[in-house]
Amino acid sequence: MKEKEEKEKKEKEKEIEKEKKEKEKEKKEKEKKKKKKKEKEKEEKVKEKEKKEKEKEKKEKEKEKGKEKKEKEKEGKEKKEKEYKGIQRNTKDIQTATDLLVLMRLLDFAILSNLQE
Protein backbone atom coordinates (compact mmCIF):
# COMPACT_ATOMS: atom_id res chain seq x y z
CA MET A 1 0.00 0.00 0.00
CA LYS A 2 2.73 2.31 0.89
CA GLU A 3 4.39 1.85 -2.48
CA LYS A 4 1.13 2.53 -4.24
CA GLU A 5 0.63 5.74 -2.30
CA GLU A 6 4.17 6.82 -3.04
CA LYS A 7 3.69 6.03 -6.68
CA GLU A 8 0.48 8.07 -6.78
CA LYS A 9 2.20 10.86 -4.93
CA LYS A 10 5.06 10.88 -7.46
CA GLU A 11 2.58 10.88 -10.34
CA LYS A 12 0.72 13.82 -8.81
CA GLU A 13 4.00 15.66 -8.36
CA LYS A 14 4.87 14.95 -11.98
CA GLU A 15 1.48 16.23 -13.08
CA ILE A 16 1.86 19.33 -10.94
CA GLU A 17 5.34 19.91 -12.39
CA LYS A 18 4.01 19.39 -15.89
CA GLU A 19 1.19 21.88 -15.28
CA LYS A 20 3.69 24.38 -13.88
CA LYS A 21 5.83 24.04 -17.00
CA GLU A 22 2.79 24.48 -19.24
CA LYS A 23 1.67 27.57 -17.33
CA GLU A 24 5.18 28.98 -17.51
CA LYS A 25 5.29 28.29 -21.22
CA GLU A 26 1.91 29.99 -21.72
CA LYS A 27 3.09 32.94 -19.66
CA LYS A 28 6.23 33.29 -21.80
CA GLU A 29 4.16 33.11 -24.97
CA LYS A 30 1.80 35.81 -23.66
CA GLU A 31 4.76 38.01 -22.79
CA LYS A 32 6.23 37.44 -26.23
CA LYS A 33 2.94 38.38 -27.88
CA LYS A 34 2.61 41.44 -25.67
CA LYS A 35 6.15 42.53 -26.51
CA LYS A 36 5.55 41.97 -30.20
CA LYS A 37 2.34 44.00 -30.03
CA LYS A 38 4.14 46.87 -28.27
CA GLU A 39 6.86 46.87 -30.90
CA LYS A 40 4.28 46.92 -33.66
CA GLU A 41 2.46 49.84 -32.01
CA LYS A 42 5.75 51.68 -31.63
CA GLU A 43 6.53 51.16 -35.33
CA GLU A 44 3.06 52.42 -36.28
CA LYS A 45 3.58 55.54 -34.16
CA VAL A 46 6.91 56.19 -35.85
CA LYS A 47 5.33 55.72 -39.29
CA GLU A 48 2.46 58.05 -38.35
CA LYS A 49 4.91 60.66 -37.11
CA GLU A 50 6.93 60.44 -40.33
CA LYS A 51 3.74 60.75 -42.36
CA LYS A 52 2.72 63.87 -40.44
CA GLU A 53 6.17 65.39 -40.94
CA LYS A 54 5.97 64.75 -44.69
CA GLU A 55 2.53 66.34 -44.84
CA LYS A 56 3.81 69.33 -42.89
CA GLU A 57 6.76 69.73 -45.27
CA LYS A 58 4.41 69.45 -48.25
CA LYS A 59 2.14 72.15 -46.82
CA GLU A 60 5.14 74.40 -46.18
CA LYS A 61 6.34 73.92 -49.76
CA GLU A 62 2.86 74.73 -51.10
CA LYS A 63 2.73 77.79 -48.88
CA GLU A 64 6.13 78.90 -50.16
CA LYS A 65 5.02 78.38 -53.75
CA GLY A 66 1.92 80.47 -53.03
CA LYS A 67 4.07 83.28 -51.65
CA GLU A 68 6.35 83.18 -54.68
CA LYS A 69 3.35 83.24 -57.01
CA LYS A 70 1.89 86.26 -55.19
CA GLU A 71 5.24 88.05 -55.35
CA LYS A 72 5.52 87.38 -59.09
CA GLU A 73 1.97 88.62 -59.61
CA LYS A 74 2.75 91.75 -57.60
CA GLU A 75 5.94 92.36 -59.60
CA GLY A 76 4.03 91.87 -62.85
CA LYS A 77 1.33 94.27 -61.71
CA GLU A 78 3.90 96.90 -60.71
CA LYS A 79 5.67 96.49 -64.06
CA LYS A 80 2.39 96.97 -65.94
CA GLU A 81 1.61 100.06 -63.86
CA LYS A 82 5.04 101.53 -64.65
CA GLU A 83 4.53 100.81 -68.36
CA TYR A 84 1.09 102.40 -68.24
CA LYS A 85 2.47 105.51 -66.49
CA GLY A 86 5.26 105.65 -69.07
CA ILE A 87 2.72 105.45 -71.88
CA GLN A 88 0.66 108.21 -70.22
CA ARG A 89 3.78 110.38 -69.92
CA ASN A 90 4.65 109.74 -73.56
CA THR A 91 1.10 110.60 -74.57
CA LYS A 92 1.31 113.88 -72.64
CA ASP A 93 4.66 114.66 -74.26
CA ILE A 94 3.22 113.97 -77.70
CA GLN A 95 0.18 116.14 -76.94
CA THR A 96 2.45 118.96 -75.75
CA ALA A 97 4.60 118.68 -78.87
CA THR A 98 1.48 118.70 -81.04
CA ASP A 99 0.17 121.76 -79.20
CA LEU A 100 3.54 123.49 -79.71
CA LEU A 101 3.49 122.70 -83.44
CA VAL A 102 -0.03 124.12 -83.74
CA LEU A 103 1.06 127.25 -81.86
CA MET A 104 4.13 127.61 -84.07
CA ARG A 105 1.98 127.37 -87.22
CA LEU A 106 -0.42 129.92 -85.80
CA LEU A 107 2.52 132.19 -85.01
CA ASP A 108 3.93 131.69 -88.52
CA PHE A 109 0.50 132.46 -89.97
CA ALA A 110 0.21 135.56 -87.80
CA ILE A 111 3.67 136.74 -88.83
CA LEU A 112 2.92 136.14 -92.50
CA SER A 113 -0.39 137.95 -92.15
CA ASN A 114 1.38 140.94 -90.57
CA LEU A 115 4.00 140.96 -93.29
CA GLN A 116 1.38 140.91 -96.00
CA GLU A 117 -0.44 143.88 -94.54
Image (cartoon, rainbow, N blue to C red):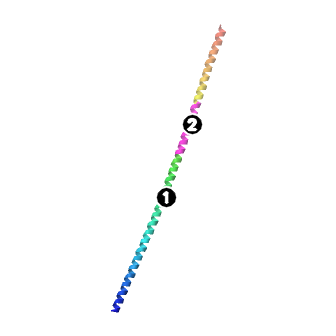
Percent position of residue 86, x then y: 59, 31
Disc 1: CA contacts within 10 A as few (<14), some (14-19) or many (>=20): few
| Stretch in magenta | 66-86
Residue at position x 60%, y 28% in the image = 90
Q: Nearer the viewer, mark 1 or mark 2?
A: 1
- The residue under label 1 is 49
Front residue (pair 87, 116): 87
Quadrant of the frame with the C terminus: top right
**Residue tagged 2:** 78
Is 75 part of what is drawn in magenta? yes
Picture layout, residue 103 above or below residue 15: above
Residue shown at the point (46%, 61%) measured from the top left = 44
Classify 97 as above or below 84: above
Question: What's the residue at 58%, 30% (across, down)?
Answer: 87
| Residue 3, image quadrant | bottom left
Q: Position of residue 74 (x, y in %)?
A: 55, 39
Give the total number of marks visible in the rendering: 2
Magenta: main secondary structure equals helix
Q: Which mark is residue 111?
A: none
Which residue type carries mark 2?
Glu
Quadrant of the image occupied by residue 89: top right
Q: Secondary structure at mark 2?
A: helix
Q: Position of residue 17 (x, y in %)?
A: 40, 82
Which of these two is toward me, 115 or 27?
27
Seen from this angle, which residue lies furthest top? 117
Whether pointer 1 and pointer 2 mark residues with C-beta atoms closer than 8 Å, the reply is no
Quick check: 5 left or right of 105?
left
Report the side of 97 relative to 27 (left or right). right
State the residue at coordinates (47%, 60%).
Answer: 47
**Secondary element at tag 1:** helix
Check the picture and name the quadrant holding the N terminus. Answer: bottom left
Q: Is residue 16 magenta?
A: no
